[in-house]
Amino acid sequence: MVGNAVFRVEGLRKSFGRNEVLGGIALDLHAGEVTVLMGANGAGKSTLVKIVSGVYERGGGTMTLAGAEFAPNTPAEAIRAGVVTVHQNINDGVVADLDVATNLTLDRLSGRGAPTLFNPARVRREAKAVADRMGLAIDLKARVSDLSLADRQMVAIARALAHQPKVLILDEPTSSLSSAEADRLFALVDRLREQGVAILYISHRMSDIRRLADRIVSMRDGVVSGAFDTKPLDYEGAVNAMLGRKIHLDQIVARSSARAVLNVEGLRIAHGAKPISLTLGDGEVVAITGLVGVGKTALAETLFGVRRPLDGAMTMNGKPYAPRSAGDAIAAGVFLVAKDRATSGIIGGFNIERNVSLPFLKRMSNFSVLKRRLERATARRQIEQLGIVCRSEKDEMSALSGGNQQKVMVARWMAQNAALFILDEPFQGVDISARRDIAAKLRASANGRATLLFLTELDEALETADRILVMSEHTIVGEHRNADVDLDRLLAEVAGGPLHNAA
Amino acid sequence: MTLRDYAIRYGFIVLLFGLVAYFAIAADGFVSPQSAVFIFQSVAITGVLALGVTATLVVGGFDLSIGSVATSAMMAAAYVMVVLEQNALVAVIACLLIGALVGLINGWLIVYMRVPDLLATLGMMFLLVGLQRIPTEGRSIATGMTMPDGSVANGKFSDAFLALGRHRFDFFIPNLIPVSVVVLLVLALLIWFFLEYTRFGRMMYAVGSNERAAELAGAPVKAYKIWAYVISGVFASIGGILLAARLGRGDIASGNNLLLDAVAAALIGYAVLGAAKPNAFGTAVGALFVGILLQGLTMMNAPYYTQDFVKGVVLVVALVFTFALSGRGRG
């Protein structure tokens, strides 16, 4: 098995400043095999991909391609050597304003030896050859901007394959495709596998992985935490290796609630998904866990009114609750600390004080004129409450560490009393001590409201929640009281399949 | 604060005072109440337009149609009084309605039709430049003009309307301060208070800085954006009223420089006090800066055709202050 690896990576390291992202990765890719790479956010997958595709320089280690040293300095060099990457963002792989034929042959338009004049007939001829080899049934004269996402992706992959690569890297290729569109992609991957291409397939979607994987490699914290290549593949083992299990169960005393705050009946958040029903109680901290892309953020946004459910009804404290905007939700006492604070939380131009007061300006003003003294007092109180490390409430957000920025986001919404407090991935890009602070604060202040956390990392859920719900395929598939959690069952639910081995 | 911080924060103000000191010494008669009032008067109309465009800059947009809104308002005022023979109040109301309507349409194009702000307002600019010529077949409007159907327009600018351009208030010296300067100062105070001290202004800044975050904090982002363009349109139409009152006729050829001067003032405003963002105080100072510079140079006999060049240099220097030195332009 070791002998026939087309592409080998050994001891690959990479650091950004003092922060080590890859700590010695070893990876083999075999011709005619699909190797699935799994890893949570921040595990180092994208860094690995960027090194292999020549975007980043590696920090240490060796890479060999078909027995020869492989050390690309630029993406173009990697492609020429036969290692081709299709990146996650589909629109990065195509030029939207050009037609399909030009897109397929774009790489031949520049570089040494490229003809100066643009010859449409020759371009179309070459493009047709590329399309035929792939079995691509798309009108070559169509403009890429008129194509569906799936077709664009096909074009991006076909364009990559015009170089006849030995190694193809697909970075979360199905993340924005429907299931029918994904089926077309899988057929294409099957075809390439038959042609003897070594494929590295990066994905979180268990259904993709079950469909395609010949081998699975799991990454965690910059190292390979598990490799699985004996059939039948151990999917739960792979998920477990990816999410890790270094749990301190003694920290939580699971509480249960007497009074229901939010009731959700038959809520459907995606086409073809099973309805969701759940009840959140007063004083309870509930975590919803599941892999990336299973609809956690969609559910959070539905509860917060920025996304409309397909079906179903909600009640808050016994009254019907159907928010049509974030404003409605806030008025009903539903607050959301949104995922990815940089794009959906922080106002870059505002200091801490103004970031904290943002949602409640109406309550902090007299005839719409802001009560600045109240604003400052609120900011100071919240800084104190959450232990935000800063010089004063006038500090710019950019001066704060990631953990403190996140504390400001939490402080913003804790300035007023919530009925339902939702936090979507509140520990992303947050150091351990800030994470402990936030979790402790959430638990200490939990009475009088329901608290709902969306967390991909199982550890975080086990550390903070009274109750853990598991999401898969846009619905809730499991429920656990955080007292005597059956981890095997939980992991099987996360992995989206029935429990295979009773062990 | 380091020296660099001081330079960013106070550099432009120091430059302004330096300029005044230089002209005070070099140009005879520069330091006099009349000269000061003249400077204010020369920037009053562009200043009003600049304050309006500041509102659209705050929400992260831009309004290129302000110049043509102002000239359209001017033509409308003349048309209402000279051709339709209505009084000053009707003329003023008609102008304000035009400004608000154009602002609404701009906002609608940008928010609901998803046309990029620069293109939407550029299109509106062309549309208005053309539209204002249609009622009179491209002629300027003045009392006694012949209409396209051969009749003669007998209405005239009412005295009350002309007073907006010609009346001067007593201020220590009799007949010193023109109405237009008072309008500028009042509007500057209003928009400054609105942007800095009300929750609406605060939210507009939030929308301009991070639209999604503002939306998730419960702000009706679309409404805020549309309102910003309505403010811009109304302010521009006020500028048009002042222009009509000053000229006393609907002059098809006037107001060419309004757009560029107003935008320059608002952008220079970014550099004032190191704000690195659109702000009302900065816009007012920016307008004043340009006025002082031009007045001083004129009194030192610099030829008129160098004016645009000088304005351009000031704008470029101010932009360097904002974006390169403060390093906050990205935020």
Image: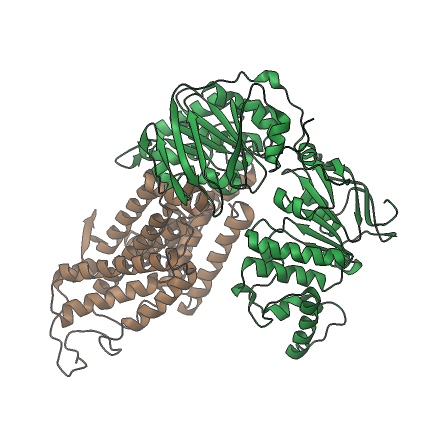
Camera-side residue of B252 and B115: B115
Q: Which residue corresponds to the image point at 22% horizontal and 75% vertical from the top-left?
A: B135
Q: How many marks?
A: 0
The image quadrant of residue A461 is top right
**Picture quarter containing residue A82?**
bottom right
Chain letter for the brown part: B
In-image side of B117 versus A498 (left or right): left
Q: Nearer the viewer, residue A283 or B181?
A: A283
Residue at figure coordinates x 34%, y 59% from the top left: B106
Q: How is the image coloured?
A: by chain
Residue B204: image x %, image y %?
Answer: 37, 45
User: Which quadrant of the figure has residue A486?
Assistant: top right
Q: Is residue B296 visible?
A: no
- Against A60, residue A490 (above or below) is above
Residue under the point 66% across and 45% down: A209
Chain letter, green in picture: A
Residue B199: image x %, image y %?
33, 39
Is any part of residue A485 visible from this angle? yes
Q: Position of residue A322 (x, y in %)?
A: 34, 39
Q: Which of A288 and A408 lies nearest the eye of the viewer? A: A288
- Above or below for A53 versus A368: below
A450 left or right of A16? left
| In this rendering, position of residue A143 left or right of residue A169 | left
State the image coordinates of residue B80 (x, y, percent, origin top left): 16, 67
* Outermost residue to the bottom: B150
Query: B236 left or right of B20?
Result: left
